[in-house]
Amino acid sequence: MAEETVAEKTIAPTDRQLASARAFVAAHGKSAKAVVENIGRIGARVVLVGADGALGDVVVPSPATGDALVEAVESLEAAEWDPATVNAVKIGSAHRRKMAGR
């Protein structure tokens, strides 16, 4: 039997990861979309899009953990980067400056 890699193994999301996602949902409209993105060896990034268009994220050890996080958080809907999700994002000037760096 082949050894299971971290990317294939479902590791339950931590209390901190769950709390972070729940706090985002509560702060940004009581519902949100979540896109799970594989970021290689480091794991996965769960990109959160609030009902108000705000962006947030939670980094987890694997895409399977990201899926488990989405399922565990009430009012968090699994999504893809389809036109509806992309158009829901509202990027303000403060966020643009933060992402641009120095």
Image (cartoon, grey):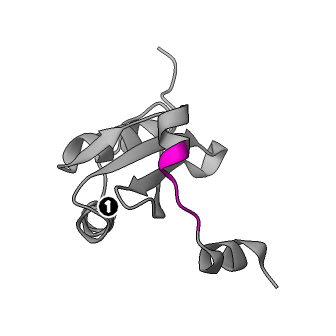
In depth, the one of 69 and 48 nearer the eye is 48
Quadrant of residue 18 within the rendered picture: bottom left
Q: Residue furthest right?
A: 102
Q: Is residue 24 magenta?
A: no
Q: Judging from the image, what secondary structure is the residue with disc 1 in?
A: helix
Residue type at mark 1: give it.
Ala
Give how far across and how far down residue 6 sits, in percent: 50, 40
Is 3 placed above or below 69 here?
A: above
Chief secondary structure of the magenta portion: loop
Is 12 placed above or below 83 here?
A: below
Is 17 placed above or below 64 here?
A: below
In this picture, residue 2 sits left or right of residue 28:
right
Q: Residue furthest left?
A: 74
What are the residue bounds of the magenta stretch?
A: 87-91
In this picture, residue 20 sits left or right of residue 5:
left
Residue bearing the label numbered 1: 21
In this picture, residue 87 sits left or right of residue 99:
left
Q: Residues within 10 Å of mark 1 (few under 14, many from 20)?
A: many
Q: Residue furthest top?
A: 1
Give how far across and how far down residue 57 sits, in percent: 47, 60
In this picture, residue 33 sits left or right of residue 73:
right
Quadrant housing the C terminus? bottom right
Name the residue: 17% across, 49% down: 74
How many tags in the picture?
1
Name the residue: 53% across, 60% down: 90
Give how far across and how far down residue 26 sits, in percent: 23, 67
Is 73 placed above or below 20 here?
A: above
Name the residue: 59% across, 72% down: 92
Give how far across and how far down residue 38 sits, in percent: 58, 40
